[in-house]
Amino acid sequence: MCFSGFIAIIPMHNHPLFAGRTLVLATMHSKEQVMAPLLQQYLGVQVVVPAHFNTDLFGFIPSNDELLLLYDADNKLEISARELTTANNFAGRQISSVREAQQFAAAAGFPQHALILRTHKHDTHHVQKGITDRDTLLSAVKKRLEAHDSVYITTDMRAMHNPTRMQAIEKATRKLIDKVAECCPVCATPGYAVTNYHTGLPCSLCGAPTRIVLSIVYTCSMCNYTNSVKYHKGKTSEDPMYCNWCNP
Ligand SMILES: [Zn+2]
Ligand SMILES: [Zn+2]
């Protein structure tokens, strides 16, 4: 059974296309802690996390951009979801006192969010990661400041040490599940998604097209069925403040 038009998660246990199948969750840094229970509950899959899978090799995606891809090899189906957020605690600073370390830690949401120490920003040899308690932090900073004038302190952005990232990953997972719930009205394949939009919602005063979205286009990646939906937010005209004629 398919549902559409819901924003919240649809309690659709055991999706018929995925129920009982194995989903290989190619991830690391304990992201499966938030992803696996949701995927198991709503897609009915058995989640397996491969050992020694190193996604750090693909480390080109910035830490505030969580991108998920569900690939169904049997049906050649790809469904993706993305959570872009400005909510992250990414920061780094060269400091020369314990007091500065304490100030940095407080601003970074420590100890819930872990910290990393290096000699300098590009130091890859003397790196201490995953610091999550005050005593370890202060003694490590003191020790380093005995040997060097300063120390580089930075936030640990690995998901298992960063609740802010874990929240974004959970949001992305829920978006993915919502997308799976949107099925093509013709072939019922999940992942019937917005692929384009057209502007031109008419001005309520003069009727001229504005630059506001008039319609959104849904496309099925399986059968290529496409449908354009007008007035998706229930508005049939736009305020003249957005009109090029009435409010140039
Ligand atoms: Zn279709
Ligand atoms: Zn107008």
Image (cartoon, helix red, strand yellow):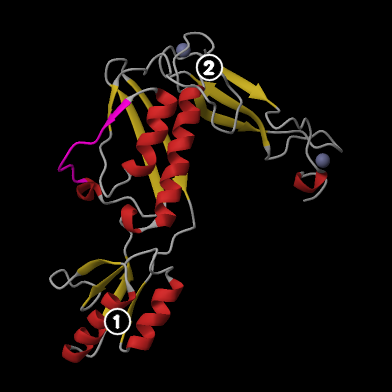
Q: CA distance from mark 2 to mark 1?
A: 59 Å
Residue in the image at 38% along x and 64% along y: 113
Which residues fall within the magenta stretch? 46-54
The crowd level at tag 2 (other Cα within 10 Å; few <14, some 14-19, many 20+) is some
Left or right: 23 with respect to 225? Answer: left
Question: What residue is drawn where x is 54% and y is 23%?
Answer: 218
Q: Residue 136: horizontal and vertical position, in percent?
A: 26, 75
Q: Is residue 201 above or below residue 242?
A: above
Which image quadrant for residue 228?
Answer: top right
What residue lies at 16% left-to-right and 89% top-to-bottom? 147
Query: Which amino acid, mark 2?
Result: Thr
Does residue 52 belong to the magenta stretch? yes
Q: Residue furthest top?
A: 186
Residue 226: give its label. Answer: 2
Residue 82 visible in the current orientation: no
Residue 105 is marked as none
Q: Residue at x 33, y 87 (%)?
A: 98
Position of 62 with respect to 53 (left or right) is right
Kindly state the secondary structure of the residue where label 1 is placed: helix
Q: Secondary structure at mark 2?
A: strand
* Residue of label 1: 138
Picture coordinates of residue 199 (x, y %)? Answer: 65, 34
- Name the one closer to the observer, 50 or 196: 50
Name the kind of residue labelled 1 in the image.
Answer: Leu
